[in-house]
Image (tube, helix red, strand yellow):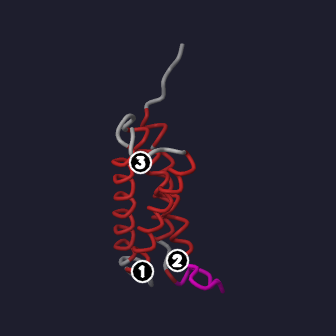
Amino acid sequence: MNIKTPSFLRGWPPAILWMALIFGLSSIPGSDFPEVPVPEINSIVHAIEYSILGVLLLRGFTYSFPGKPVFRLVLFAAGSAILFGLSDEWHQTFVQERFFELQDLIVDAISAVLGILLYIRKTELSLLTK
């Protein structure tokens, strides 16, 4: 007997877990983070987080909407990552010694798009076809 796993269960758990991890890290008060003597470490961490998030969201949308144009799925994934980044920055305004930082949101958006584009290149998906 061949039981097919629903596409939601195959595509979305990694993205949801990754977003939960980002939310959890954003909930830590600023004073609880250790000082790291690396220039722009905050931007580096954001770039890694959101490039991975962009890929995981694209994967989720690809499983959920097979046969849809890849360009449309890329827009959904990038838009979702950017909206999540915006909500994450807003969430930090409620956390002690954390702030909304426009620079972080910009890094999040650029990194999500770059992660998606690198993933497309690596997997040889075409933006112009299904």
Could you tell whether 67 is left or right of 5 in the image? Answer: left
- Image quadrant assignment for residue 101: bottom left
Q: Nearer the viewer, residue 15 or 66?
A: 66
**Of callouts 2 and 3, the N-terminal one:** 2
Determine the secondary structure under disc 1: helix
Determine the secondary structure under disc 3: loop
**CB under 8 Å between discs 1 and 2:** yes
Q: Position of residue 130 (x, y in %)?
A: 39, 38
Separation of residues labelled 1 and 2 (CA atoms):
8 Å
**Of callouts 1 and 2, the N-terminal one:** 2
User: Which residue is disc 1 drawn over?
Assistant: 103
Placement of the N terminus among the 4 image quadrants:
top right
Position of residue 78 relative to residue 122, above or below, is: below
Query: Magenta residues?
Result: 31-43
| Residue ranking furthest to the top | 1
Predominant SS along the magenta part: loop
Callout 3: few (<14), some (14-19), or many (20+) C-alpha neighbours within 10 Å? some
Type of residue at label 2?
A: Ser
Is 32 contained in the magenta span? yes
Callout 2: few (<14), some (14-19), or many (20+) C-alpha neighbours within 10 Å? some
Type of residue at label 1?
A: Gln
Separation of residues labelled 2 and 3 (CA atoms):
28 Å
**Of callouts 1 and 3, the N-terminal one:** 1
User: Which residue is disc 3 drawn over?
Assistant: 127
User: Which residue is disc 2 drawn over?
Assistant: 43
Q: Position of residue 105 (x, y in %)?
A: 40, 73
State the residue at coordinates (47%, 46%): 59
Separation of residues labelled 1 and 3 (CA atoms):
28 Å
Q: Position of residue 126 (x, y in %)?
A: 45, 45
Type of residue at label 3?
A: Leu
